[in-house]
Amino acid sequence: MRILVIEDDPKLAAFVAGGLKQAGFSVDHAADGLDGLALARQGHYAAAVVDLMLPKLDGLALIEILRAENNRLPVVILSARAKLDDRIRGLQA
């Protein structure tokens, strides 16, 4: 199974990808929201791990665009944001 990791911090992306690979997953990586959106639209992923604070297109906007396009890719949100509004918006996306 292939997982998409969308994370701009190279160390964190490598850490997440490494754990997923050890668990037997294939992993693709995008370092910004626009590249991540392009990969996610290809539809070849079992799930995506998405950072909220991404350059070019933030993670919540990326998820909202996918949902507006009826893309039901399962998403795990990865973020240092702790605000309640961000959590609610993430769940609604």
Image (tube, rainbow, N blue to C red):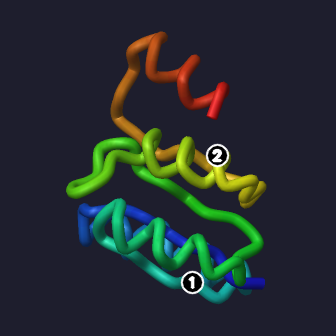
Q: Quadrant of residue 42?
A: bottom right
Residue that label 2 marks: 68
Secondary structure under the numbered disc 1 in the rendered image: strand
- Residue at the (31%, 52%) spot, across then down: 57
Q: Earlier in the sequence, mark 2 or mark 1?
A: 1
Check the image and report above or below for 32 versus 92.
Answer: below
Q: Is residue 56 left or right of residue 33?
A: left
Mark 1 residue type: Val
- Residue at the (55%, 42%) spot, across then down: 64
Residue that label 1 marks: 27
Q: Where does residue 60 sit, x and y in percent of width and height?
A: 46, 40
| On-image quarter of the N terminus | bottom right
Whole-angstrom CA distance, mark 2 to mark 1, is: 25 Å
Nearer to us of marks 2 and 1 is: 2
Q: In front: 88, or 34?
A: 34
Q: Where does residue 76 sit, x and y in percent of width and height?
A: 62, 49
Q: Quadrant of residue 86?
A: top left
Check the image and report above or below for 62 versus 80.
Answer: below
Crowd tier of the residue under label 2, counting other residues whose Cα lies within 10 Å: few below 14, some 14–19, many 20 or above:
few
Mark 2 residue type: Ala
- Residue at the (66%, 26%) spot, across then down: 92
